[in-house]
Amino acid sequence: AVANAMKDGAPTKALEGFARGAGAKIEDLTIVHDGKQDVYAYEYVQTGKPLGELLEDIINQAVKKLPIPKVMRWGSSTFTFVRPVHGLIVLHGDDIVNVSVLGLQSGNQTLGHRFLSSGEITIENADSYAAQMREQGKVVASFAERKAAIQTALN
C-alpha cells in the first residue's frame, strides 16, 4: 500500500522487498488503485516458453501426486507407477509435444487392445485420440462411456 510504502521520504523495507521480489527498481513501480486503496505495482511482459518446457514438469508433478496406494517398478528402471508404462502420447493439436515422463519420450503412436486391435496406431491429432482408439484400437478411452457400456450390458 502506498500509505505504508514510504517513511520520512525513504522507501520502507516492505516496498524494497516488493520491488526486489518483482525484479524491479523502486523507480520502475507505478501507483494504481486496487479498488480499496492506492498500491505500488509493477507490470512486465514475460516471453513465452515452448509448451514442452512447461508441460514436462507439470505432468511429472501430477504423476507423483496421483493417489496410488501401491506402485510397481518394471525392468531395471527406477520409475514407479501403478502399472508398467510402455508408451507416452503428448499432443497439442497435430503437434507432438516433446516431453519425457516416467523415462519415456513422447510420440504419437500407441497400441490398442492386446487381442482385438491389429498393430500400432498413429494418433493423427489430440482431438482424434478417443475416436481412433475406439475404432482402430478397440479401446474406449472415456471412463464414463465405458461405465455406461458395462451398465447397459449388465441390464
Image (cartoon, grey):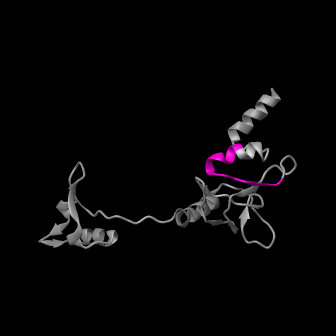
Foreground pick, 111 / 73: 111
Q: Identify the residue at image location x=67%, y=48%.
A: 129
Q: Is residue 116 located in the magenta-colored stretch of the structure?
A: no
Asked where in the image residue 66 lies, by quadrant, the reply is bottom right
* 150 vs 15: above or below: above
Q: Identify the residue at image location x=82%, y=49%.
A: 113
Q: Which residues are magenta?
A: 119-131
Asked where in the image residue 48 lies, by quadrant, the reply is bottom left
Q: Identify the residue at image location x=61%, y=56%.
A: 91
Left or right: where does residue 8 sit relative to residue 120? left
Instruction: Confirm whether residue 12 shows in the render.
Output: no
Q: Position of residue 81 (x, y in %)?
A: 72, 61
Q: Position of residue 26 (x, y in %)?
A: 22, 71
Q: Is residue 130 located in the magenta-colored stretch of the structure?
A: yes
Foreground pick, 64 / 6: 64
Q: Position of residue 28 (x, y in %)?
A: 23, 69
Left or right: where does residue 139 sit relative to residue 130? right
